[in-house]
Amino acid sequence: MLLGLRELVLHPAAYVAHVPPNPAAVSEVLRASTIALFAMLGIECAMIPADRVRDPARTIPRATLTGTLLVALIYICISVIPMLLIPQPELVASNAPFADLFSRLLGSGSGRWVAAFVIISGLGALNGWTLILGQLTQTLAKHGSFPAALGKVNTHAAPARAFVLTGAAASLMLLMNYNQSMAGTFTFLSVVVTAANLPLYIACSLAVLVLWRRGELVLPGSRAWTWFAAALLATGYCIGVFIGVGTKSLLWAIALGAAGVPVHLWYRRRRANGSSDSTGRYSVAIREEP
């Protein structure tokens, strides 16, 4: 980002030559919004350590909002620089815009170093998502939505079976799209994952609107109107992303959601038949972390 800003300051005419000649169509903006939302997925994961955080009712919302705004600002600044410094035809055909940008500014060999650091960063993100998915699967198993075996942990207090399941599912989706280019595969998977998460986000936005209408959104002063406006904007944005995901990705997301319905109904039936504890939840034997 600093290198790009330096180039823009020293050569202000560089970005004027690469401005798109025609404005983007609405359909293109909607498709781009889908990829943009994928980069922000998981903001709700800050609630996972709620039982280990001091004053979670205040700390978690503040951390979520501050972190989201900070990351969005960094993403926007970083994404704009290649768009301004790389000619549009080259940018469209590029599979690694940042590596190409460094190659243009610092020489052909520098792009390889950027690609190496991107891989390292990607591995870190992959580790984080692997841990989150494992914890999420374990939590669902604790509440009876998944088989109890997925909630069990190994000698290191890690849900190993949940890690294997989520890793195998992700690998299967990659293998089913192996004939596409790397960029095409990433785009497809990101759009499918975004489409699969949209029902959660739009349901939460609509829930805020319903609570506001009922007068149950207990917030001081004008904060209730702030929440109402934010929920309204979020609902509209989610609808726009739904339109931009495309038919293929939307069908994949529906299929993934439908695949979990039989499992959910089966466990509901087991609980209804008396396989529940005194609290009404399905009883599972899980080793608790120390």
Image (cartoon, rainbow, N blue to C red):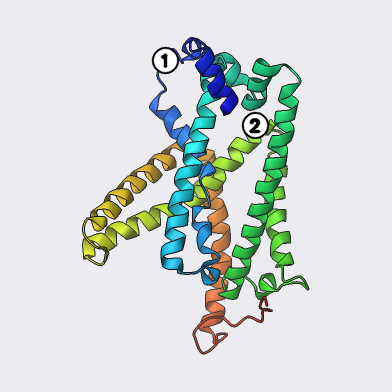
The residue sitting at 47% across, 56% down in the picture is 63
The residue sitting at 25% across, 67% down in the picture is 216
Left or right placement of residue 85 versus residue 165 in this view:
left
Left or right placement of residue 172 versus residue 214 in this view:
right
| Quarter placement of the N terminus | top right
Q: Foreground residue, 147 or 67?
A: 67
Please count the marks in the image: 2
The mark nearer the N terminus, 2 or 1, is: 1
Residue 239 position in % (x across, y down): 38, 44
The residue sitting at 71% across, 31% down in the picture is 115
Q: Which residue is mark 1?
A: 22
Residue 44 position in % (x across, y down): 49, 57
Mark 2 neighbour density, 10 Å: few (under 14) some (14–19) many (20 or more): few
Mark 1 neighbour density, 10 Å: few (under 14) some (14–19) many (20 or more): few
Q: Could you tell me the amino acid type at mark 1? A: Asn
Q: Is residue 111 above or below residue 153?
A: above
The residue sitting at 32% across, 59% down in the picture is 208
Q: Quadrant of residue 258?
A: bottom right
Residue 117 position in % (x across, y down): 71, 35
Secondary-structure class at tag 1 = loop
Q: Residue furthest bottom?
A: 278
Q: Foreground residue, 290 or 179?
A: 290
- Residue 161 visible in image: yes
Q: Which residue is mark 2?
A: 183
Q: Could you tell me the amino acid type at mark 2? A: Ala
Residue 270 position in % (x across, y down): 57, 80
Secondary-structure class at tag 2 = helix
